[in-house]
Image (cartoon, rainbow, N blue to C red):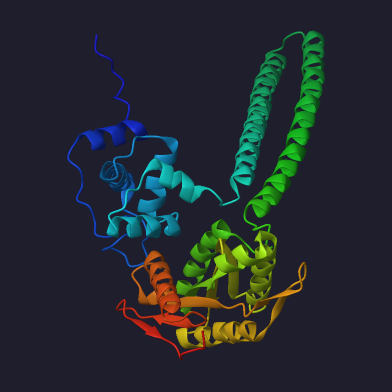
Amino acid sequence: MPDPRPPRAPGILGRLRSLLSGPQPASAPDAGWADDGDPHDTAPHGPDAIFAEMAGFLGRHHLRLSQSTLLAAYDCVTGNDPRLALAVAERERAAEPVSLDWLVGFRRGEGVQDELAAVARLMERLERNLESFSQTTTQARTATTEYSAALRDQVDGLQQGGDAGAMLADVLAIARTMIERTHDIERHMVRSEQETRALHRSLEETRRHAELDHLTGLPNRRAFEHRLARELVAAQAEGDPLCVAFCDIDRFKRINDTHGHDAGDRVLRAVACALNEISDDRCHVARHGGEEFVVLFRGLPLDEAYDRLDETRDALAERRMVNRATDIPFGKVTFSAGIADVFEYPDSREALRAADEALYIAKKDGRNRIVRASAQVRLIAGPPKAA
């Protein structure tokens, strides 16, 4: 006899395997970057499109299905990790392989895996607690229904002239049992509510911890990506300009090699502090990884955002820092930057890429300067600065 149930929809792995075994979608010039469609849409439309692009990513780079490769494919095609997508695109342009070892190496050093694992554990506990709370609520609803039916039967019996004394005793017994059971359910609900509140507080604290760069005290890359998504929606709704800048400490490797990593960490904190001085409720600064920082300006046109960041660059370049451990001067500590108007590009990922390319030009043109990115992917340098 045929099974009357409808066939189960294939899972993620099944759909990806099916796509990988069939014809592969054409490779885009810049893998992982969306084009066409809504200019503010940063992901393929619908799960089938996402699966197809993920399959294309895995097939194009000859990657086997695994948790790491699936996450990398998803982060690239949906824009969940713009920096990874940009790095993959750069390797493709350079005809360099995107291997599992390279992906693992790129992911390493984010410094939030332990915190994210803690978040996951808290979420599991919270889900279990909410499930228990739901079961207690269901039990309360069931008990109420049962007692209501039992009481209704006794009332009907009294109305029909039954033994009033016996029925009254039954009603009292039902009421006593209902009171006791209701008290037990109430205690369970109060305990579940208290545990849920405690878990929410722990989860919120762990999330904040996971989005903090512990060396500089600034938000980390993950926090910035969440902030960018929120500010993009708010700026679109209110008609505000939105600009993003990548900043990179000049010759940082030389500082580490000459003075040691502890001194390099102090320089990182000093630059972070200098950049953080311009932050407010509409200017957000984060450490993006390594010696690179990212700044998001909402409400300032490109030229005004450029001027504000350039004042910080100039003030930092005027300082003379000394390694306190050795009394050896660091010399001039500077940073280079690339800045882009987010709304001049089809989506935020393209704006991030333009700002990153502008940073590359700033480094190439002598460092200690900021470069504006144009919407035509034409890079225009600001006023020349001394290297």
Q: Quadrant of the N terminus?
A: top left
| Residue at figure coordinates x 63%, y 66% from the top left | 258
| Residue at figure coordinates x 68%, y 17% from the top left | 150
Q: Nearer the viewer, residue 68 or 43?
A: 68
Percent x, y for residue 367? 49, 79
The tally of labels here is 0
Picture quadrant where residue 329 is located: bottom right
Q: Vertical placement of 352 versus 69: above or below?
A: below
Q: Would residue 239 appear left or right of 289 to someone viewing this image?
A: left
Work out whether residue 11 can be spotted.
Answer: no
Percent x, y for residue 89? 33, 58
Percent x, y for residue 129? 67, 33
Q: Vertical placement of 90 versus 127: above or below?
A: below
| Residue at figure coordinates x 31%, y 60% from the top left | 34
Q: Vertical placement of 187 versus 379: above or below?
A: above
Picture quadrant where residue 181 is located: top right
Work out whether residue 361 can be spotted.
Answer: yes
Q: Vertical placement of 382 versus 375: above or below?
A: below
Residue with the most extreme left position: 23
Percent x, y for residue 75? 42, 50
Q: Nearer the viewer, residue 332 or 52?
A: 332
| Residue at figure coordinates x 29%, y 24% from the top left | 6
